Image (spheres, helix red, strand yellow):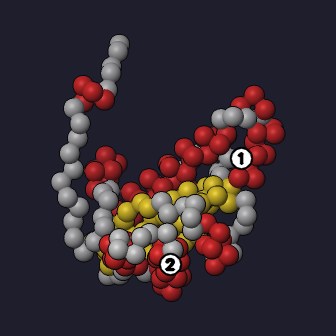
């Protein structure tokens, strides 16, 4: 499949299940390869990933559910609860982190660029997330990117032994595609692009 076709295939899929054709080892390999080969500033390789499958995937979404139960109004919680159940119905979740100690080391080594390293770290994370999402989509595995950080950070770090210098940036929940994504619309190119020669 051509790269642009792979990008088009990557969509936000909310209706996911556990009926994936790949086994856990193959999925883990895809995620590792996608992140390993994603570019980063100064080849800093700041991205870290915690891959949650099986009971660990379920445990993570229960942490999210119970955290939200404490802050979402009771009358609004059933909708939130239903949404979290949809994520828990998936096959797994990849937690994307950025190693802040690496960022701080780069700031010390290259003080002229110190203010940029946190920004470039975010770029690295976004690229790793996109690469992983697209690689999974190529295997007909649906996913959606979620952002329940920072409200879940501390409890998740304890539950999964995450180093204190890792900063949670996003959660990619994935599984079998149980319903396709809706039609995607695009804004007018004239509002988005400029070309000069």
Which residue is tagged 2? 66
Instruction: Determine whether 174 is above or below 35 in the image.
Output: below
Quadrant assignment, res 194: top left
Residue 43 point in image, percent of width and height: 65, 44
Which residue is tagged 1? 103
Residue 162 point in image, percent of width and height: 68, 70
Instruction: Determine whether 94 is above or below 5 in the image.
Output: below
Q: Nearer the viewer, residue 151 or 90?
A: 151
Tell me which numbered mark, 1 or 2, is placed earlier along the sequence: 2
Q: Is residue 134 left or right of residue 157?
A: left
Residue 143 point in image, percent of width and height: 37, 65
Question: In this view of the protein, can residue 194 be seen by the observer?
Answer: yes
Instruction: Please state, as top left, top right, bottom left or bottom right, where the C terminus lies in the image.
Output: top left
Q: Is residue 186 left or right of residue 72?
A: left
The residue that appears at 65% across and 43% down in the rendered structure is 118
The residue that appears at 48% across and 55% down in the rendered structure is 129
Q: Nearer the viewer, residue 154 or 117?
A: 154
The residue that appears at 65% across and 51% down in the rendered structure is 45
Q: Nearer the viewer, residue 171 or 54?
A: 171
Give the SS element for disc 2. Answer: helix
Determine crowd level at label 1: few under 14, some 14-19, many 20+ residues with C-alpha closer than 10 A: many
The residue that appears at 81% across and 39% down in the rendered structure is 108
């Amino acid at each position: 499949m051509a790269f642009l076709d792979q990008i088009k295939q990557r969509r936000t899929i909310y209706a996911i299940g556990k009926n994936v054709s790949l086994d856990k080892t193959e999925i883990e390999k895809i995620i590792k390869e996608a992140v390993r080969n994603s570019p980063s500033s100064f080849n800093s390789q700041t991205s870290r990933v915690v891959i949650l499958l099986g009971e660990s995937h379920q445990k993570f979404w229960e942490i999210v559910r119970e955290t939200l139960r404490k802050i979402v109004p009771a009358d609004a919680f059933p909708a939130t609860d239903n949404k979290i159940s949809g994520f828990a119905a998936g096959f797994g979740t990849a937690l994307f982190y950025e190693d802040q100690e690496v960022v701080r080391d780069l700031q010390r080594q290259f003080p002229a660029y110190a203010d940029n390293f946190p920004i470039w770290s975010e770029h690295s994370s976004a690229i790793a997330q996109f690469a992983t999402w697209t690689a999974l989509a190529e295997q007909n595995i649906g996913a959606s990117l979620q952002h329940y950080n920072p409200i879940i950070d501390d409890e998740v770090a304890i539950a999964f032994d995450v180093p204190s210098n890792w900063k949670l940036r996003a959660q990619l929940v994935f599984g079998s595609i149980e319903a396709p994504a809706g039609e995607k619309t695009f804004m007018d190119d004239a509002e988005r692009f400029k070309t000069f020669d």
